[in-house]
Every structure is written in C-alpha cells, then in structure tokens.
C-alpha cells in the first residue's frame, strides 16, 4: 500500500511538475489576459463610452454623465450644474477616471505595460467600489459578503475575482504573446 501511494505521489509530481514548467513562463499571463478580454474589456469599454461625447471627436470631451456617475456629491453641491463643479479635484478625478477606463484595459489586452496597467485597474476597481457603495448607495444585498454561501454578489464576489485575475498579471506578467514580451526580446 505504501509503495502504491509513493508511486502515485511521484507520478503526480512528475506529471504536474512538467506541466508547470511547460507553461510557467507564458501560459498564466496569457490566460489571465484572455479572460480579462473575454469577460471585462467590453464591460469597461461600454462603461467608459457613457462618460464621453458622441462620435470620434466626442472622445475628447467628458460628458456631464461622467460627473453624475463619478462625482455626484460635487454636482449636487453645485446645484446640478456640471460647469460649476471645480476642476480641482473633481474635474481631474472625473477626467482621469474616464480615460483610465479606456486606456488601462486596452493596455492589458494588448500586453503593453501590463503589470502597471493591472495594478492601475486594481486601484480603479477599488475607487469604483467605493463610489458604488458611498455615492450610489447600492444595497447590502448587491454588496454581498465574503465567505457566505452566495457567490453572486456584484461587489464582494465579482470584484474579488477581477482582482485575483489582475493579480496574476502583476505577479506572473502578461505572457510571451504580448507587446511586453516583444520589447523584452528586443532589449536583450
């Protein structure tokens, strides 16, 4: 019995050690970026598009909706007049948040400055979560709780999985099929 367990343990170590060595340098980052592109890229892109004007040149103008989504207390303090909201800090926050929502996901998908972009997205998700809870005052059911028996809360469960996915990119890198990898080969 002991020799059978030892045999299975050694077989397990050899097989999965080989699999780990085979995909260690490139696979996890690529899978994480693919999952981000498949699940989250269009979510962030569609959200970002609600914060800018229409058409090509509309991209260069922040819509009033962006202020209502990101800085609602400042808009309310200005009597609902977005033009009266001070640029520092609110306008800067809205502008950086809006363009971050376009740029950071794109950098992750193409694999350029991936680790830094993933770190930025984790910060973005933290701010997004703070705004959803404090400004938009979403209910406790939507916020959810970790370690409960319900895996479907919008905030606690889903965003934790987003952060885990982004953490893989920070720790393991974007993988060999990325612009970062091409730049590394070019520098070497």
Image (cartoon, rainbow, N blue to C red):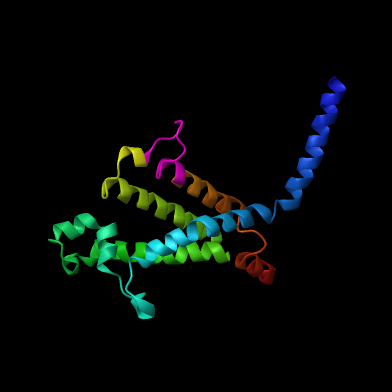
Instruction: Determine if residue 113 is in view.
Output: no
What is the quadrant of residue 177 in the picture?
bottom right
The residue drawn where x is 30% and y is 70% is: 62
Q: Nearer the viewer, residue 55 or 86?
A: 55
Instruction: Determine if residue 26 is in view.
Output: yes
Q: Is residue 102 above or below residue 153?
A: below
Q: Is residue 87 left or right of residue 53?
A: left
Outermost residue toward the top?
1
Q: Nearer the viewer, residue 110 or 123?
A: 110
Q: Is residue 163 left or right of residue 55?
A: right
The residue drawn where x is 57% and y is 66% is: 110
- Would you say residue 156 sits in the magenta stretch? yes
Percent coordinates x, y for residue 90 in the rendering: 25, 61
The residue drawn where x is 41% and y is 52% is: 125
What is the quadrant of residue 35 in the picture?
bottom right
Outermost residue toward the right?
3
The residue drawn where x is 77% and y is 42% is: 17
Q: Is residue 137 left or right of residue 57?
A: left
Q: Is residue 68 above or below residue 151?
A: below
What residue range appears in magenta?
143-158
What is the quadrant of residue 25 in the picture?
bottom right
- Would you say residue 25 sits in the magenta stretch? no
Quarter occupied by the N terminus? top right
Q: Is residue 48 above or below residue 139?
A: below
Quarter occupied by the C terminus? bottom right
Outermost residue toward the bottom?
57
Q: Is residue 61 above or below residue 9?
A: below
Percent coordinates x, y for residue 179 in the rendering: 61, 68
Secondary structure predominantly adopted by residues drawn in magenta = loop
Q: Is residue 5 left or right of residue 180?
A: right
Percent coordinates x, y for residue 51 in the rendering: 33, 66
């Amino acid at each position: 019995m002991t020799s059978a367990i030892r045999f299975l343990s050694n077989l397990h170590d050899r097989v999965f050690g080989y699999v780990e060595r085979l995909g260690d340098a490139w696979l996890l980052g690529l899978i994480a970026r693919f999952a981000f592109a498949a699940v989250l890229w269009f979510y962030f892109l569609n959200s970002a598009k609600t914060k800018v004007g229409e058409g090509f040149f509309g991209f260069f103008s922040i819509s009033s909706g962006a202020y209502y989504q990101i800085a609602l207390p400042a808009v309310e303090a200005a009597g609902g007049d977005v033009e009266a909201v001070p640029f520092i800090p609110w306008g800067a926050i809205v502008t950086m948040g809006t363009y971050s929502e376009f740029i950071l996901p794109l950098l992750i998908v193409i694999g350029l400055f991936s680790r830094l972009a993933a770190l930025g997205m984790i910060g973005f998700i933290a701010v997004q979560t703070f705004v959803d809870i404090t400004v938009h005052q979403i209910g406790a059911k939507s916020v959810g709780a970790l370690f409960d028996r319900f895996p479907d809360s919008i905030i606690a469960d889903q965003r934790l999985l987003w952060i885990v996915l982004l953490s893989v990119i920070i720790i393991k890198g974007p993988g060999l099929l990325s612009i970062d990898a091409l730049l590394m080969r070019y520098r070497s």
